[in-house]
């Protein structure tokens, strides 16, 4: 999967670039027909992937040396030659069709012919007396939990208690050893485009522009290029990165890269987003901003979110409910009294629940 050749003629944005939740339209308002194959695309010069040239200074700017050659398309030329790897990745997405499975850049989904026209409705997720872990090494036993459609469930617990294992089981990456993981009452038997998994590490593909990274799940689904380009631009605008689409990941800050990962996770309109400590490496101010951004862009999508974190305050701000995991069990699930209300941090009910969580997680 690759991004598009940025010639001036082919880089013109479709006139119908839309807000999330509606199908992007081709120029002139006509819905583009899906092609039988996606052309190979390119977003960057191979030199940009060289470690010595791909370092930024952490604040959204790379070193001034060579500024003209990196991350921008100054004169309408392509930003670089395509790579064989991108062509192979995109080819795999085509060949997989409905069942073709692809994992790249921190999002795993299956190939699908569905476009972006689907208005979202969240998935109901559940574990039924499930034993989670690897064969011979169970991590969580007798897991029973229901996650209603459209809710945000936060998951807290000490390191090594199985939070990430729970997330990967719901994603379909790790089958339960016993019991059942289900979506909408049907067993989860593997990864699916309905569920996007966002990892903690920065998993953007370095040779793709920011827009190209956001296009990734749409390319896997064989969404026509004009439509996915418009959709990606709309999502970049929604996360506050309008005009940054042609930058390469190394040219923007860590917080901006996290914004791109969030846009990429939601661009394909998954019905569930599974997030494994996505803001854990950010400073406190940037982290608070990303929490609010998640809330802002999640509203209206209808998606169900499962959000793993070590930060109890983060769990109490984001979640409708918070699940406490310890000693190989889902210890309890508590309703959050004032979800997504910053002003309720010191409210008596919030303080009481915070104290209860800390006490329950003590060794």
Image: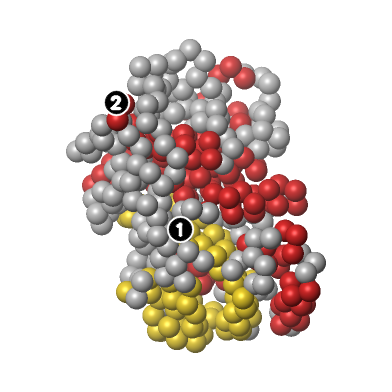
Sequence-first disc among 2 and 1:
2
Q: Residue 80 in the image: x percent, y percent?
A: 44, 23
- Residue 212's place in the image compared with 158, above or below, is above
Q: Quadrant of residue 159?
A: bottom right
Left or right of 148, for residue 89: left
Residue at horizontal 55 percent and vertical 28 percent from the top: 243
Label 2 to label 1: alpha-carbon separation: 29 Å
Q: Which residue in the protein does label 1 denote?
A: 302
Which mark, residue 28?
A: 2
Q: Nearer the viewer, residue 46 or 129?
A: 129
Residue at horizontal 53 percent and vertical 40 percent from the top: 238
Sort mark 1 into few (<14), some (14-19) or many (20+) by Cα contacts within 10 Å. Answer: many
Which mark, residue 236?
A: none
Left or right of 291, for residue 217: left
Would you say residue 334 is visible in this rendering?
yes
Sort mark 2 into few (<14), some (14-19) or many (20+) by Cα contacts within 10 Å. Answer: few
Residue situated furthest top in the rendering = 75
Residue at horizontal 52 percent and vertical 71 percent from the top: 165
The N terminus is located in which quarter?
top left
- Residue 65's place in the image compared with 311, above or below, is above
Q: Residue 320 in the image: x percent, y percent?
A: 59, 68
Circle 1: element type: loop
Circle 2: element type: helix
Would you say residue 89 is visible in this rendering?
no
């Amino acid at each position: 999967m690759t991004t598009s050749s940025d010639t001036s003629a082919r880089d013109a944005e479709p006139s119908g670039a839309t807000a999330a939740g509606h199908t992007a339209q081709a120029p002139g308002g006509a819905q583009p027909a899906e092609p039988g194959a996606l052309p190979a695309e390119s977003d960057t010069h191979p030199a940009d992937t060289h470690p010595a040239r791909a370092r930024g200074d952490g604040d959204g700017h790379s070193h001034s040396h060579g500024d003209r050659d990196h991350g921008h398309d100054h004169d309408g030329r392509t930003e670089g030659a395509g790579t064989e790897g991108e062509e192979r990745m995109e080819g795999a997405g085509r060949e997989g069709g409905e069942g073709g499975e692809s994992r790249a850049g921190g999002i795993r989904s299956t190939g699908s012919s569905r476009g972006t026209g689907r208005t979202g409705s969240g998935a109901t997720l559940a574990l039924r007396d499930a034993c989670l872990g690897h064969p011979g090494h169970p991590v969580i036993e007798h897991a029973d939990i229901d996650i209603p459609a459209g809710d945000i469930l936060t998951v807290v617990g000490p390191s090594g208690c199985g939070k990430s294992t729970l997330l990967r089981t719901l994603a379909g990456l790790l089958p339960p050893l016993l019991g059942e993981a289900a979506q909408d009452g049907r067993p989860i038997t593997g990864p699916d485009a309905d569920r996007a998994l966002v990892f903690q590490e920065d998993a953007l593909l370095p040779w793709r522009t920011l827009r190209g990274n956001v296009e990734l799940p749409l390319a896997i689904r064989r969404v026509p290029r004009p439509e996915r380009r418009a959709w990606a631009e709309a999502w970049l605008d929604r996360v506050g990165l309008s005009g940054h689409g042609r930058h390469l990941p190394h040219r923007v800050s860590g917080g901006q890269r996290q914004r791109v990962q969030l846009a990429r996770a939601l661009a394909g309109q998954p019905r569930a987003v599974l997030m494994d400590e996505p803001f854990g490496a950010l400073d406190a101010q940037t982290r608070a901003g990303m929490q609010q951004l998640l809330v802002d862009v999640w509203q209206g999508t209808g998606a169900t979110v499962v959000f793993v974190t070590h930060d109890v305050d983060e769990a109490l701000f984001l979640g409708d409910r918070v699940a406490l995991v310890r000693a190989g069990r889902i210890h309890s699930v508590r309703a959050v009294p004032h979800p997504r209300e910053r002003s309720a941090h010191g409210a008596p009910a919030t303080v009481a629940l915070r104290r209860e969580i800390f006490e329950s997680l003590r060794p």
